[in-house]
C-alpha cells in the first residue's frame, strides 16, 4: 500500500488516507448561508469516496472580519441547518469534515462589512495597502478570541469532525504572527511567543467551547518570503509553540506571499516549511502547495516532509484525481 493511501491515527485525528481537500473558497454562499451550488460543489469533489479529509472553505467569525461578499458564515448570522447539510454532504462522500474559521482583519473592506477594519496595528497590509486599519485594543482582542470560540462551537454543533483556525495568507491572526504587520509593543508584539499569544488564546478558548474530544487544526502562513517578514526559523519555532498550545494538526501554507512560494516552483513548494515544522513538533503536519502528481505526493510523504497532502488546483480541475492517484500508486 502507498503511504498516500495509508490511514493516519494521531491523538484526536483518525483518517482513512493522507489525501486532504484544502479550504478553497467557492464564493457561492447566499449571504453567508449554505447554497445549493455550494453543496453541489462538495458533493462533486467527494463523490469518488477517495478523500480522507475535507477542510471546508473559510467562514467568517464576525461581520467585521468578513473577507468577501459571498463568504460562508460561522458568525451569529450563520445558517445552522445549511452547515449541518454541508457536513452531511461531505460525510456522504466518505471523508471526515473540518471547517475553517477566519477573521480578515486589515484586509476586510468596509464596503463588505459596513465597518472600519481592525488589525494588530494601524499598519496597512501588504495585500491591501490602501486600507488603513484601526489598531486593536486588548478589549478588541478578547472579543475576537471569543468570536473564534463561538464560531467553533457552531461548527461542532453542525456535525463537523473538527475545526481549523486560519492564520495564513495575510488574514488577522497571520497579521499578528508576521513582523510585517505586528509592531505592537505590548504582550502581543515583539517576540515570536508574544506574536503567537492571540493564537494561544484562541486555541484555549476554542478548546473550552468544543470540549476535549474535538480536533483543532491551525493553518499557519509560516513564512512571508519578504524582507522583514516571518522566516523558516519562525515556522519551526511556531510549530512547537502551537503544539504546546494544544492543536491536533498543523496545516502549513504561505503568509503574505499567499498561496505561492516566490523562491520555489517545484511541487510541494512549502515543503521546507512543513519539514522544519515536523522537526520541532510531533503532531501531524499537512502540506499543500502545487502538488499535481501522485508520485510527487508519495515522495513528499516518504521523505518526511509532511504527514498529509493537500491537493487543491488539481482537484478543482479533476474530481477523480484522488481515486486515480491512489490507483496509480497501488499499481506501480
Image (cartoon, rainbow, N blue to C red):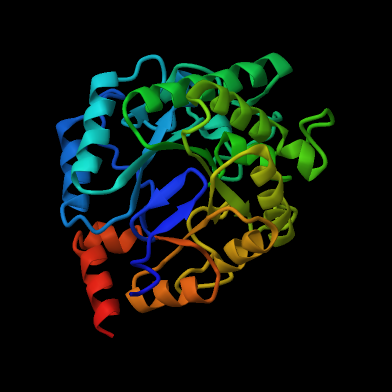
Q: Is residue 147 left or right of residue 156?
A: right
Q: Is residue 163 left or right of residue 305?
A: left
| Residue 34 seen anywhere in this rendered image of the structure | no
Who is closer to the viewer here, 7 or 40?
A: 7
Who is closer to the viewer here, 32 or 152?
A: 152
Residue name at image x 21 percent, y 66 percent: 323
Give x and y (percent) for residue 87: 27, 35
Q: Quadrant of residue 33?
A: top left
Direction bottom: furthest residue: 332
Give x and y (percent) for residue 282: 62, 56
Residue name at image x 17 percent, y 45 percent: 43
Q: Is residue 84 left or right of residue 264?
A: left
| Residue 133 seen anywhere in this rendered image of the structure | yes
Q: Quadrant of the N terminus?
A: bottom left
Q: Quadrant of residue 320?
A: bottom left
Report the number of numbered marks: 0
Who is closer to the viewer here, 195 or 242?
A: 242
Q: Quadrant of the C terminus?
A: bottom left
Who is closer to the viewer here, 16 or 146?
A: 16
* Above/below status of 130 relative to 145: below
Residue name at image x 61 percent, y 66 percent: 275
Give x and y (percent) for residue 249: 52, 48
* Above/below status of 77 relative to 95: above
Residue name at image x 52 percent, y 20 percent: 147
Q: Is residue 48 left or right of residue 314?
A: left
Q: Quadrant of residue 261?
A: bottom right
Give x and y (percent) for residue 81: 24, 21
Amino acid at each position: 500500500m502507498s503511504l498516500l493511501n495509508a490511514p493516519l491515527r494521531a491523538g484526536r485525528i483518525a483518517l482513512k488516507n493522507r489525501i486532504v481537500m484544502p479550504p478553497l473558497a467557492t464564493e457561492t454562499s447566499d449571504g453567508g448561508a449554505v447554497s445549493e451550488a455550494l453543496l453541489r460543489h462538495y458533493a462533486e469533489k467527494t463523490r469518488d469516496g477517495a478523500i480522507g479529509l475535507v477542510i471546508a472553505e473559510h467562514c467568517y467569525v464576525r461581520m467585521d472580519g468578513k473577507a468577501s461578499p459571498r463568504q460562508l458564515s460561522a458568525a451569529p448570522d450563520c445558517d445552522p441547518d445549511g452547515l449541518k447539510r454541508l457536513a452531511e454532504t461531505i460525510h456522504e462522500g466518505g471523508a471526515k469534515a473540518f471547517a475553517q474559521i477566519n477573521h480578515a482583519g486589515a484586509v476586510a473592506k468596509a464596503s463588505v462589512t459596513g465597518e472600519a477594519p481592525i488589525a494588530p496595528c494601524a499598519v496597512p497590509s501588504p495585500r491591501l495597502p490602501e486600507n488603513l486599519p484601526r489598531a486593536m485594543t486588548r478589549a478588541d482582542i478578547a472579543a475576537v478570541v471569543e468570536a473564534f470560540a463561538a464560531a467553533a462551537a457552531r461548527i461542532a454543533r453542525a456535525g463537523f469532525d473538527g475545526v481549523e483556525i486560519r492564520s495564513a495568507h495575510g488574514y488577522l491572526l497571520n497579521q499578528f504572527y508576521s513582523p510585517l504587520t505586528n509592531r505592537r509593543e505590548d504582550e502581543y508584539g515583539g517576540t515570536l511567543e508574544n506574536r503567537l499569544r492571540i493564537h494561544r488564546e484562541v486555541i484555549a478558548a476554542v478548546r473550552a467551547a468544543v470540549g476535549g474530544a474535538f480536533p483543532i487544526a491551525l493553518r499557519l502562513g509560516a513564512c512571508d518570503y519578504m524582507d522583514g517578514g516571518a522566516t523558516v526559523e519562525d515556522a519551526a519555532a511556531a510549530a512547537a509553540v502551537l503544539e504546546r498550545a494544544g492543536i491536533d494538526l498543523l496545516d502549513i501554507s504561505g503568509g503574505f506571499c499567499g498561496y505561492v512560494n516566490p523562491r520555489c516552483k517545484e511541487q510541494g513548494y512549502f515543503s521546507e516549511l512543513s519539514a522544519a515544522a515536523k522537526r520541532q513538533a510531533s503532531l501531524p503536519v499537512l502540506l499543500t502547495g502545487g502538488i499535481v502528481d501522485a508520485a510527487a505526493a508519495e515522495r513528499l510523504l516518504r521523505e518526511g516532509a509532511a504527514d498529509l497532502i493537500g491537493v487543491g488546483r488539481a482537484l478543482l480541475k479533476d474530481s477523480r484525481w484522488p481515486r486515480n492517484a491512489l490507483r496509480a500508486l497501488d499499481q506501480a
